[in-house]
Image: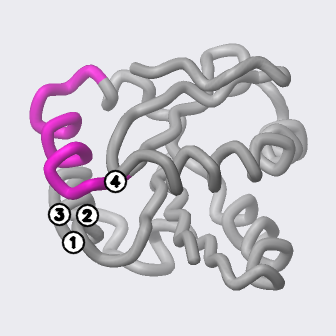
Amino acid sequence: MVKVLFDHNMPPAIARAIHELVRLDGHQACALRDRFDPSISDVDYFDSLGSRDEWVVISKDLKNSRKRAERAAILRNRLVAFYLSPALQKKSMHQQTASILWHWEGILQQRAIIDRGLFQLPENKARFRQL
């Protein structure tokens, strides 16, 4: 079972809608604010998720992938993080949700074959780009 946490910069509606679809296969999706205090730092919630289950984080904060402390926390805690590409970030919430769902099987597959990493989620049907 994979658990997906949508970062505070993602609309909680996306997490809740995706959860309704993926729970049928035993997976979970949740918004950060439904699990943690909204003021929690990225490093603190990465540390809290770490080494528990098979967590995936989805975020729009592409700059976060370049920050030393955040990047180290993702890797240290064996998380797989996907960051929406700049082109995908400009799309509507519905288009972002559709793209995440389109890539869902790939997200699950990526989580199954690696134990940590950072990737860019493309707007189209292209492959994930490692960050």
Return the x and y of residue 100 as percentages of the image width and height: 75, 45
Q: Horizontally, is 114 left or right of 3 in the view?
A: left
x, y percentage for residue 99? 82, 38
- What segment carries the magenta color? 66-79
User: Residue 111's x, y, as percent?
Assistant: 51, 53
Give the prevailing secondary structure in the magenta stretch: helix
| Residue bearing mark 1 | 48
Q: For this view, does 95 lie left or right of residue 105? A: right
* Amino acid on which disc 2 is placed: Tyr
Q: Is residue 12 shown above or below 57?
A: below
* Helix, strand or loop under label 1: helix
Q: Earlier in the sequence, mark 4 or mark 1?
A: 1
Circles 3 and 1: CB atoms closer than 8 Å = yes
Task: Tell me the element at label 2.
Answer: helix
- Residue 46 figure quarter: bottom left
Mark 2 and mark 3 residues within 8 Å of each other at the beta carbon: yes
Query: Which amino acid is tagged 1?
Result: Ser
Quote the CA–CA distance across marks 4 and 1.
11 Å
**Which dot, 4 or 1, sits closer to the camera?**
4
Q: Which residue is mark 3?
A: 47
Q: Which residue is mark 2?
A: 45
Q: Which residue is mark 4?
A: 79
Residue 30 position in % (x across, y down): 57, 72
Marks 2 & 1, CB-CB < 8 Å contact: yes
Disc 2/disc 1 C-alpha distance (Å): 5 Å
Callout 3: SS: helix
Q: What is the image's colouring?
A: one colour
